[in-house]
Image (tube, rainbow, N blue to C red):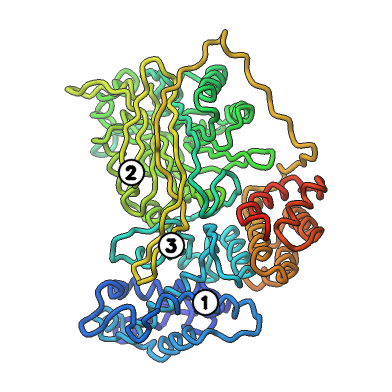
Amino acid sequence: MDGEESSPGPAGGAWTVGSLWHDIAGRRLGDELLEWAPDLFAFTDVVLDRSEAYRFAVSPPEGASWPPPQMPDWYLAVADASAGWCAWVEGDGTGLPGLVAEQWAVVCERSATSLDELAAGRAWRICRALLTLHAIADEACAGTGVTVADVPRDGARFRARARELLARTGTLSRISRQRLRVLPRVRNPVGGPTIRSLSRYVCVRGPEVDAVWNRIPAGTVGPGGPAQEGNVLMLPWPLRIDAEDFKPTGPVERGGPEPHGFFEFAPAELLDLDLADRVLQSARNQQGSVDIVVLPESALRPGDIDELEALLTRHRVWLFVAGVREPPGPGGRFGANWLHLGVWFGGRWWRYRQNKHHRWSLDDNQIEQYHLAAALPPAVRWWEAMAVPRRAVQVVELDEGVTLVSLICEDLARLDEVADLLRAIGPTLVVTTLLDGPQLASRWTARYASVLADDPGSAVVTLTSFGFVDRSRPAGRPASRVVSLWKDPVRGLREIPLDADAHAVLIRIQVGRTTRHSADGRPPVANTANISAEGVRQIRALDRGDHTGVAMPEAPADHEPALSLQAAELTILTCWAEAVAEVLAASPDQLSTILDDARAGAAWRRQLGVAEPSADLASALQDLARMVVSATPTAGAVLAAMDESPRGGTYGHLVRAILRSKLGRRGPGG
């Protein structure tokens, strides 16, 4: 893309379609937007949002109607234009779809239209063009971020490049990420009108919060397939917390109207691996398997992660979320508070870190409620002694579009840009770990969980330490043992207590399919994941005499040192495997083109300003190419060839695991 231009500002104080885009994107309106669907989407979304003309999709101005009456099958025309646009971008010799060319000409001719004219409905012709182009660009972006089953036959190269661009830069767009970002959308609100209800595959956000999009083909859900079930083990540990576990750090600052100091949480009750082992085995005895394990905020120290992951591997757990408290380093004033998210795939744990963005603050009321006065004197505002990092949200996309976001305590409650980002993306599941009192329907966590469950429809689960629940004794209120709260748009809200003789609770979840809506007149499509809680079971640890332990599963015979690949590189490798699966299913003649684009040195990376693959990633991409071209270009043939030839280069084991997931979801026939 060309360099940014200085903004001329609105002429006469009135923003126009053209001047607004110049100010937002730093460049004049031009035909280059047609080359890249996320860029065209960003333009139309920004203009419709700033002018509030998006509302005309559900409430057209007087004398007008939507969809356009001259196009009775408008949504079919949009779908055709989107597919044709993908073919045009691929350079297969077809022309730019007529609907795209026609509507774009209207926009260019009327780019001097003021936002006031758009907002009032007086510029209906350009408004119609913007709404139509917005829908076409949104449809063309299907599959660029979140995996969907039905994508156009053409466009696999575009989608694969866009996925790598997202993994590298945090945006699908070629426009500077310091100006705006185009991100995948998982779910959107049914109601409206809002700009969020107008699209179903992508959204536009500002530069305030980094969204790090990770893809890892772990899990068991396939597009359009039957509902799948899983078991989530919630360990509300520590089970005991003493006042002395809260320790002041440094002197109290008494200058100003309110004295304040900093505290550190360092519980005496450390992780008990033997207890965890017996709880996991008890849960497996009752339910058959444990798929996901969650521990509350600050439950672990950094040194606990390796040992606990080794234990989880033996119990065949494949997803792990836990709060980590990290003390300050030598000479440092503050430590860190973050969430560890681990996913077992391809013979190793892939690790993701979600930082906490808001310090915990303890005032007089909370010190009294939690009986902490012996450690933290009242009449002082006590702040958590943690560094406050730059805001970023880790989105982990599991197999076929199930997306997970993890938050820590007040990050759920703050109505800031992080909350706006979550509502725009609409993740499938939001896991929030806390160090808080009972997770009652009447408390703050339920209110904020309800916001996300209602709009955009995410499932939200919270977990706190029972030790802290037990310390919470507000005057005039009965004691409670509710350690977790689940809210989803299907089953609603559920309080989850820990029984007196239990050490954990297990939530049975069901993962199915639900619909994406768009308020612009396109019919809904059932191609996104939905998670609901189907039941809860109390888990008591096995007695020591009844538990003999479990053996570590054997590593695959060709297990390679995949530790050298980074999580972001796994995302890129997965993106190209997805592209391979797409072309094998729809257009096998394009396979060599896809593989050429994936290889190191491909010209498109220089054109988009994308970094070259590292040596390790380049090696893994080469293994992908070798494995695919060794067989007849069909999904079934590739799967059969992988079984016949178990080895396949340095990263053969990992590549085969990814391909089995991606090709298996699209059917063996290819």
Q: Nearer the viewer, mark 1 or mark 2?
A: 2
Location of mark 1 (residue): 4
Q: Amino acid at mark 3?
A: Val
Sequence-wise first label, 3 or 2: 2
Q: Does residue 391 show up? A: no
Report how far apart the C-alphas of labels 1 and 2 lie in the structure: 41 Å
What residue did someone put label 2 on? Answer: 449
The residue wearing badge 3 is 525
Query: Which residue is the extreme one toward the top?
Result: 545
Residue drawn at 57 percent across, 49 percent down: 399
Residue 510, image x, y percentages:
45, 41
Q: Bin the neighbour count of mark 1 within 10 Å (Cα to Cα): few under 14, some 14-19, many 20 and up.
A: few
Of the 4 image quadrants, the one containing the N terminus is bottom right
Q: Position of residue 446 (x, y in %)?
A: 29, 39
Question: Which residue is located at x 73 percent, y 65 percent?
Answer: 595
SS assignment at label 2? helix
Between disc 1 and disc 2, whose residue precedes?
1
Mark 1 or 3, nearer chain start: 1
The kind of residue on which mark 1 rests is Glu
